[in-house]
Image (tube, grey):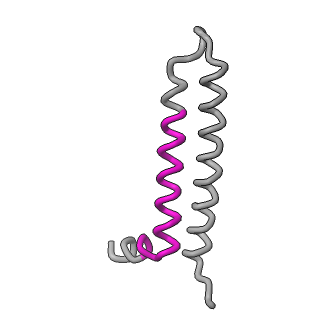
Amino acid sequence: MKTNPENLIGLFFILLAIWQFIAFFKAFKAFCTHAIKGTSGFAPYAFWSGLIYAIIFLGMGISLVFNKLAEFLSGL
């Protein structure tokens, strides 16, 4: 079985997405249990942007593994 660079990069993005999901849930749980009145109001935006990045990384990884993104980008 031949491995191409797109599959390896896709695997990297999937692993990065998993790490990002874990970091999001850990930080969100800590925020919910330890938030006080002086906590920044911008903290939820940071959590949700982390979740959005995780979804983007997962989508890129899956599409690279299945060579859909590579085909799309080669057609541009």
Give, as a single range, the part of the protein colored magenta: 47-70
Looking at the image, which residue is at 65% across and 42% down? Answer: 23
In the rendered structure, does residue 48 fall within the stretch colored magenta?
yes
Snapshot quadrant of residue 50: top right
Say left or right for 19 vs 69.
right
Q: Residue furthest bottom?
A: 1
x, y percent for residue 8: 62, 73
> Up-down: is 62 above or below 29?
below
Say left or right for 4 vs 67.
right
> Up-down: is 17 above or below 35?
below
x, y percent for residue 17: 58, 54
Looking at the image, which residue is at 51% across and 23% down? Answer: 42
Prevalent SS, magenta region = helix
Q: Residue furthest top?
A: 37
x, y percent for residue 64: 50, 71
Say left or right for 44 vs 22.
left
> Up-down: is 69 above or below 19?
below
In the rendered structure, does residue 49 fall within the stretch colored magenta?
yes
Figure quadrant of the N terminus: bottom right
Looking at the image, which residue is at 64% across and 33% down? Answer: 27
x, y percent for residue 76: 33, 72
Looking at the image, which residue is at 61% across and 68% down? Answer: 11
